[in-house]
Image (tube, rainbow, N blue to C red):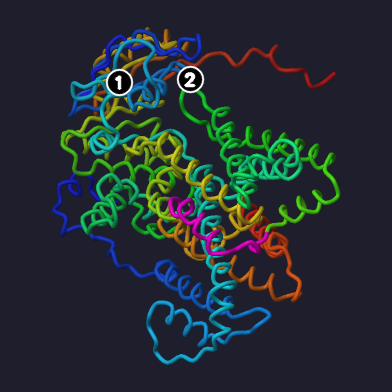
Amino acid sequence: MFDVQNLSYLAGRRPLLRDVSLQARPGELLAVVGANGAGKSTLLRLLSGDLAPSAGSVRFEGRELRAIPGPALARRRAVLTQQHSLTLAFSVQELVLMGRYPYFRGQPSAHDHRVVAQALQLVGLTPLAGRSYPTLSGGEQQRAQLARVLAQVWEAEAGFLLLDEPLTGLDLNHQHHTLDVARALVQHGFGVVAVLHDLNLAAQYADQLVLLRQGQVVAAGAPAAVLTPAHIRHAFAIEVELLPHPTLGSPLIVPVPRPAVAPGLWPTSNP
Amino acid sequence: MPAVAELLTAPAETTAAVPASAATAAEVRRRLLLPVLAALLIGAVLVGAGAGAMRIPVPAVLGVLLHKLGLDVGLAFEPQHEAVLWAIRLPRVCLGVLIGAALGLAGASMQGLFRNPLADPGLIGVSAGASLAAVATIVLEATLLSVLREWLGFYALAAAAFVGACGTNLLVYQLSKEGGRAVVATMLLAGIAINALAGALTGVLTYVATDEQLRSITFWGLGSLGGASWPTVLSVLPLLALPLVLLPRLGKSLNLLALGEDQAAHLGLPVTRLKRQLIVLATLAVGTSVAVAGSIGFLGLVVPHLIRLAAGPDHRVVLPGAALGGALVLTLADTLARTAVAPAELPIGILTALLGTPVFLWILLREKRRRLA
């Protein structure tokens, strides 16, 4: 599990994260939510080891994260980043096979190929396995990267997935499908930490929520306890009402209608 | 869409696996590329060794080679064939193969490091630094560096160029470090700045040079394999063997680096160490090549491109492919350089640039069309 204690991160002198403590356990989906610039991605980059803490600690399986050798860590946890810079014309299958690189030296084994095929099937990209990655649509690229990340920790015991805005660019069906995959992994004993923007999806799928505002934790715990109108007003500066989800019973967040943007902000077009 | 939970728990046999041996056209090209290039290279070496003022037929070239290896299979050759081949042609062809392979490989490695298909070792100042040091040796020789000349003799120029290449590259690397890791974008910009500075200093030296020195500078800058002898080949061999053996082993790592530095690190790649290895080995390859053969342009840029066009972007194929391709192209170019205007000789740098530029522009236009499509 990830154990975060009093974690702070400064970019130069600007604090991006202040005194954050949390635990992410196997068998749980932890969603990190908050407004733009609240520190969600910074938190995830600290968890994935991209950034070194300015203060406090990130421990994984009881060891200081940045002291764990890269290859050993790679077989236990995989990271899906927000942006992808792959421009070379690798095929989708070659890309997903890269998720297996920590497992073989020379040539991939039959097992590696099998995992690639299963991961592709899981994200629904089997028909596009031979396609060149740069020619895919944004959402398909995102799913191909997800398959790569899944292949990386396919058979890990209590493995971890860190997902930074995994739903960006996905259609409604695939947003839910991605979270379905995450839930299935969680039931399999995986731990998942995901930065999510859609509070309703977070409420429906997450076991634990962490709500951030200006680098600090506003509230943490079960979705129903975190997603109160008062917390949301504090974190997002917006008035909301809560309705029970018609079938699931989880909270459904509906913004309260507010007056149109002040007309004075627009330049007058007619003289 | 498959039921997720089912698929995760399903035994491996029940899920449709894409067969590992799926032989698509691309896969076939990928597998054939290296054997085909190797065969072409052997052909080019035999033909290249035979071409020149005294034409030696391919069977005779083979005969001499086998004879030198202690095998006499009855391929006829004349004694003067053996003399010319051994003393003049073979060292030159060997040097061409080594340098071509080193330049192709260094180019492919740098393009992988910068994740930019237009990167070239010249971009990070290696060639400019080598040129500056070489020109300095030529111009200031009479006063400052005569001691060096005394020690190193013929190799003074080569040694100076090599030191210059390593020095500029180290400077660029230090300039681009932020908090212990080299930032690739800064490195490109620093390389451009150092290139400009080295160019200006070379200009100053050219300005004060005598007519005779100017001629030396010009010809050195155009590149040539003309200085080849067995001692030259043996002196560059250890320096080039290191990159030629070690760089092709970094294919998997470069594939991961193509995902992005953070993503590669998430997959367990020691990114900082990899970058350092790539820079040191590529500098060694290019610095040594420039030192003995002058600046040979465009090879490191164009050859990896052609390999990627033929076999796709997998660095496990691109790296050895670029080495074989570079050796092939330089062997052919040198053969042409020696024979086109015989008995005179064209500087090989002119040939590679003349042939390389149209190919390079064609690639640029192709990429542009593809982006617009």
Q: Nearer the viewer, residue B101 or B314?
A: B101
Q: Whole-percent x and y of residue B6?
A: 17, 48
**Quadrant of residue A63 in the image?**
top left
Q: Whole-percent x and y of residue A233?
A: 42, 9
Quarter of the figure that contains the C terminus of chain B: bottom right
Q: Earlier in the sequence, mark 2 or mark 1?
A: 2
* Element under disc 1: strand
Q: Nearer the viewer, residue A207 or B32?
A: B32
What residue is drawn where x is 73% and y is 61%? B350
What residue is drawn where x is 67% and y is 73%? B336
- Determine which residue is flagged by label 1: A251
Residue B234 lies within the magenta run:
yes
- In the displayed structure, would residue A106 be above or below residue B87? above
Q: Amino acid at mark 1?
A: Pro
**Residue B234 seen in the current view:** yes
What residue is drawn where x is 32% and y is 17%? A210
For mark 2, does the 10 Å Cα neighbourhood hold few (<14), some (14 to 19), or many (20 or more) residues? few
A97 displayed left or right of B291: left
* Mark seen at residue A36: 2
- In the displayed structure, would residue B292 be above or below residue B275? below
**Quadrant of residue A209 in the image?**
top left
Residue A20 lies within the magenta run:
no
Q: Which residues make up the magenta segment?
A: B224-243
